[in-house]
Image (spheres, rainbow, N blue to C red):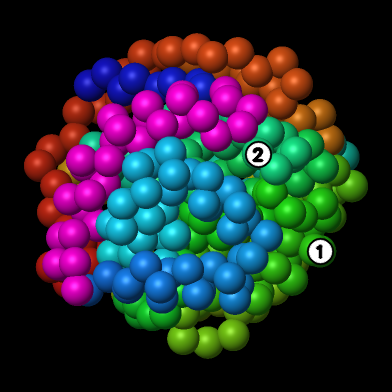
């Protein structure tokens, strides 16, 4: 199966972003309404939550709502507040060498992914990363020198909070160090459990275990897969091999310092690289972030796409991934 990736840059929200919203909104609208409109919070609830937890991005939120047409449903969706539940796989780790390098695999359903690497200068801060929901991010880097990425935390609980891609956007828009990002991630409520690893230009790093039903845990772990301090969803852990992937990466960190390229290469092979698209956890890409340099690479077996905060160019790449089989919803069916 061919997956079309786009690299898109727009300094301030404008016609490029509006065009993307018009293109993607029908699919996102169906997803947002899959449990019915009444299952989602009202516009006032969404706005109040943003004002309480992420007031700094309210002007940006308003601008995007205007570009999306100013409708009630679109504005509620763009708040990312209490969205429908969704799962991903993913692995991430920090290379133990001197240069700050964060490497991650994003394992997800290709039919439910933006396939956009978005570069912006919103609110005066350069940010680039893998888009989710057209302004949220699942990984990225900013011009202050921090990079971050997420993995699903392996818990069934769904609660009151935001979809984590918007939280990552907010961190990259406002934070300059890993310590500052860790404090912010611990404060903002997430609607599901996620592990967010942050690395800064000085090679300081944190991994924050976020949950909707208990206080966040800020750790100094350099590896995150799909559980938190212990496995809490056994079926999901078995299906995604989260313990085996964590153990594999920890061994690579503790035995000796591998050359950077060899460490990255391990993400493009089993057990880290996954072809389980029939279960919604195939590896869509490997991302390599070097926050000190403002660099990123998207990688696949046999292909490397370099990107840079200061030399970003719009582009299109066609990437071949294993063809996924018909999907089911692991959360809704209780399988996973």
Left/right placement of residue 202 relative to residue 289 reads right
287 relative to 294 in the view: left or right: left
Residue 36, given in percent of the width and then of the height, sits at: 14, 67
Work out whether 263 lies above or below 198: above
Q: How many marks?
A: 2
For mark 2, what is the residue? 122
**Of discs 2 and 1, which sits in the foreground?**
2
SS for tag 1? Answer: helix
* Residue found at x 37% / y 49%: 70
Q: At which x and y percent is residue 16?
A: 46, 24
Magenta span? 9-38
Tell me which secondary structure the magenta stretch mostly adopts: helix
Q: Earlier in the sequence, mark 2 or mark 1?
A: 2
Q: Give 181 or 29, whichever is nearer the viewer.
A: 29
Tell me where residue 257 sits by quadrant: top right
Does the magenta-highlighted stretch encompass residue 110? no
Name the residue at the left extreme: 326
Whether residue 10 appears in magenta in the rendering, the answer is: yes
Q: Residue at x 58, y 48 (%)?
A: 60
Q: Which of the labelled discs sits on residue 179, or is there none? A: 1
Residue 79: x %, y % from top left: 44, 60
Q: Does 222 sit above or below residue 131? A: below
Residue 250 in sight in this render: no
Between the residue at mark 2 and the residue at mark 1, the CA separation in whole angstroms equals 23 Å
Left or right: residue 88 versus residue 189 is: left
Q: Quadrant of the C terminus?
A: bottom left
Image spot of residue 207 (x, y percent): 66, 63
* Residue count near mark 1 (Cα–Cα under 10 Å), binned few <14, some 14–19, many ≥20: some
Query: What residue lies at 13% left-to-right and 54% top-to-bottom?
Result: 328
């Amino acid at each position: 199966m061919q997956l079309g990736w786009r690299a898109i840059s727009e300094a301030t929200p404008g016609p490029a972003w509006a065009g993307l919203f018009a293109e993607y909104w029908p699919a996102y609208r169906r997803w947002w309404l899959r449990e019915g409109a009444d299952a989602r919070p009202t516009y006032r609830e969404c706005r109040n939550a943003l004002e309480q937890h992420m007031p700094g991005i309210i002007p940006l939120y308003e601008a995007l709502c205007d570009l999306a047409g100013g409708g009630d449903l679109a504005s509620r969706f763009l708040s990312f507040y209490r969205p429908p539940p969704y799962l991903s796989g993913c692995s991430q780790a920090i290379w133990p060498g001197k240069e700050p390098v964060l490497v991650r695999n994003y394992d997800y359903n290709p039919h439910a992914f933006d396939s956009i690497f978005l570069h912006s200068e919103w609110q005066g801060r350069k940010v680039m990363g893998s888009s989710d929901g057209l302004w949220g991010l699942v990984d990225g880097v900013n011009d202050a020198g921090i990079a971050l990425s997420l993995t699903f935390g392996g818990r069934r609980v769904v609660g009151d909070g935001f979809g984590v891609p918007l939280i990552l956007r907010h961190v990259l828009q406002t934070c300059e160090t890993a310590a500052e990002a860790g404090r912010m991630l611990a404060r903002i409520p997430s609607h599901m459990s996620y592990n967010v690893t942050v690395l800064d230009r000085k090679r300081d790093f944190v991994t924050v275990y976020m949950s909707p039903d208990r206080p966040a845990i800020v750790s100094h772990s350099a590896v995150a897969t799909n559980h938190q301090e212990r496995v809490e969803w056994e079926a999901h852990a078995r299906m995604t091999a989260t313990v085996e992937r964590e153990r594999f990466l920890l061994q690579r960190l503790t035995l000796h310092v591998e050359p950077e390229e060899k460490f990255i290469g391990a993400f493009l092979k089993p057990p880290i690289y996954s072809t389980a698209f029939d279960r919604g956890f195939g590896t869509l890409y490997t991302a390599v972030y070097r926050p000190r340099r403002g660099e990123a690479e998207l990688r696949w077996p046999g292909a490397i796409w370099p990107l840079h905060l200061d030399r970003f160019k719009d582009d299109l790449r066609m990437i071949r991934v294993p063809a996924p089989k018909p999907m089911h919803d692991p959360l809704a069916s209780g399988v996973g």
